[in-house]
Image (cartoon, rainbow, N blue to C red):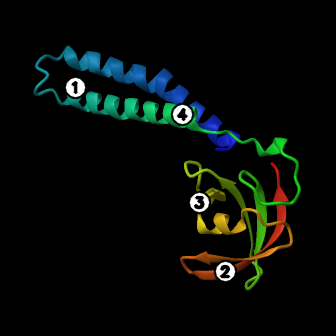
Amino acid sequence: MTAEGAEALQVELKHLKGEVRPRIIAAIAEAREHGDLKENAEYHAAREQQSFAEGRIQEIEGKLADAQVIDVTSIENKGKVIFGVTLKIINVDTEEEKSYQIVGDDEADIKQGKLSVNSPIARGLIGKEVGDEVAVDTPAGTVVYEIDEVLHI
């Protein structure tokens, strides 16, 4: 995972532990004061929220414990496409230029220009260098891209 992705998970974890968890605990305590728990919808809703939040906390802690964080800014830029780089590619047929960062699966968001390292485009580009033309098999068919620029940002 990228350093940026790890930081985003740390922020979410801090929010869940510091704000969401105490709010849910307070909601459960308040719902218990209302009496019979079997028919108390507020109590059951709060317990469901607690279950979701605790599951997400465990999921994030597991990802952070298992993750190998790669800070691409500390790696020398040799013009080669590797995990974490931001690259500019040009569609050879349409001359359309796009910019993507190759990130881990959890960080991927195509609308923000973040490609999963396991996506067909990223798999086709990894290991290639600036100036290379790469034929990438996509769900829409084969597309030829030229690697215009590789940035370590």
Residue holding disc 2: 143
Tell me which label, 4 or 1, sits earlier in the chain: 4
Q: Residues within 10 Å of mark 3 (few under 14, many from 20)?
A: some
Alpha carbon distance from label 2 to label 3: 17 Å
The image shows residue 121, relative to residue 48, as above or below, that is below
What's the residue type where badge 3 is placed? Asn
Residue 29 spot, x, y in % from top left? 27, 15
Tell me which label, 3 or 4, sits earlier in the chain: 4
Dot 2 and dot 3 residues touching (CB under 8 Å): no
What's the residue type where badge 2 is placed? Val
Identify the residue at horizontal 87%, vertical 52% (top origin).
77
Dot 1 and dot 3 residues touching (CB under 8 Å): no
Under circle 4, the secondary element is helix
The image shows residue 136, relative to residue 63, as above or below, that is below
Closer to the eye: label 1 or 3 = 3
Q: Residues within 10 Å of mark 1 (few under 14, many from 20)?
A: many
Under circle 2, the secondary element is strand
The image shows residue 120, relative to residue 47, as above or below, that is below
Residue 43, disc: 1
Residue holding disc 4: 12
Residue holding disc 3: 118
Identify the residue at horizontal 85%, vertical 67% (top origin).
130
The image shows residue 77, relative to residue 6, as above or below, that is below
